[in-house]
Image: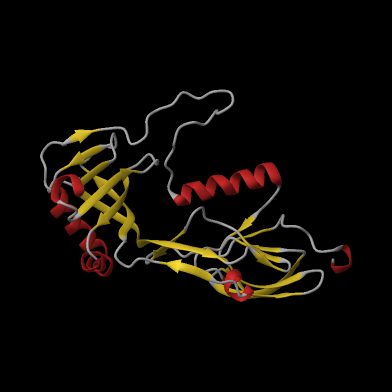
Amino acid sequence: MEQWALGGKEPERIFEMVSFVEDTPSRPYNNTLLLGQDRHEHILRSVLERDYGCNVELATELVSFEQHADHVEARISKTVNGQEMLETAVFAYLIGADGARSVVRKQSGLTFLGESPPSVSMVTGDMDIKGIDKKYWRIWGGPSTNGGGPAVSLRPCETDDDRFNFYFMGSEEANEKILSGGRDAVIQGLKEITGRTELQFGELVWLGLWRPNIRMVNKFGEGRVFVAGGKLFSIFLKRTKLRKFVFRRCSCAQSPPADRE
C-alpha cells in the first residue's frame, strides 16, 4: 500500500497491510485476497451450482412468511422481464441471511439492539480510471498527514481493466455532497484530494454509503425460522445507484415434509 499526502507528488511511505505468510498443508489459504462483492457472489453461486446442485435465484425478494407446526410458507416477489410476479413456496425451515434490514428478523419479532454511529461513515463505489497503475492500493490524506481530515482510497479491482474501488473519508456534510452529486462530485473529490489532474474518468459503476451497524439480535430464531450472518457486527451498505440488494433463495433448501409435497 502507498500512503500519500493530500496532493502529494511522491508517496510518504510504502508498506504491507498484511504480511505474506507461506501456505501450509494444515492452512493452505493463509493470505488475504480482496474481491469485489459482485465477483465474490458470482464465485459462490458457481460453486453452489457446480458442487451442490443448488441454483441461487436473483431478482427475488421475500415479502412475508407464515409459520405452521410442520412447515413455513414464504410469499416471494420475483422480477421476470421487468414484471413483478408473486408466488408462495413451502419449506420445512426458513433461514434469513438478509442483512441489517432483515425482513425475516422483523417479522419474527426479534430485537436488534445496538447503535449505528452517524459520525462514522464513508462514501464508496467503483469507477473506471485511467492514468494510474494498478500496482498499489493508494490512500491520500488521513490521520498521518492532516490530523484526520479528508482522505480518499483507491484500490485496484481484481478485474483486467481500469476499474478501481474508492472510499471517501470525511465529514457527514462532505459525504452527502458526493452522494448527491454523483459522478461529477466523485471526479471533483478525487482530483482535489489526490492532486492528480491527469486522471481520466470513465463509468461510475455504483456509488453508496458505508456505515457500521453495531447490533445484535436477542435470539437467533423463533420456531422454524432462523436468522444468520455477520461476525461481531453487520454492515449495512446502502447502494444508491445501479444495483439493488435482493433476497436470494436457494432451490436446494430443505424440502418440505413428504405430506406437503
Extreme residue toward the right, this view: 259
Question: Is 57 left, or right, of 93 in this rendering?
Answer: left
Residue 50 position by quadrant:
top right
- Which of these two is toward me, 26 or 246? 26
Here the colouring is: secondary structure
Question: Is 39 left, or right, of 218 in this rendering?
Answer: left
Q: Is residue 242 visible?
A: no
The quadrant in which the N terminus is found is top left
**Which residue is located at x 32 percent, y 68 percent?**
118
Against 73, is 38 above or below? above
Question: Is 20 left, or right, of 177 in this rendering?
Answer: right
- Which of these two is toward me, 15 or 233? 233
Q: How many marks?
A: 0
Residue 81 position by quadrant:
bottom right
**Which residue is located at x 57 percent, y 47 percent?**
44
Question: Is 3 left, or right, of 37 in this rendering?
Answer: left
Q: Position of residue 10 (x, y in %)?
A: 13, 36
- Which of these two is toward me, 82 or 105? 105
Q: Position of residue 128 (x, y in %)?
A: 30, 49
Q: Is residue 113 visible?
A: yes
**Which residue is located at x 46 percent, y 51 percent?**
37
Q: Position of residue 23 (x, y in %)?
A: 50, 25
The quadrant in which the C terminus is found is bottom right
**Which residue is located at x 78 percent, y 60 percent?**
255
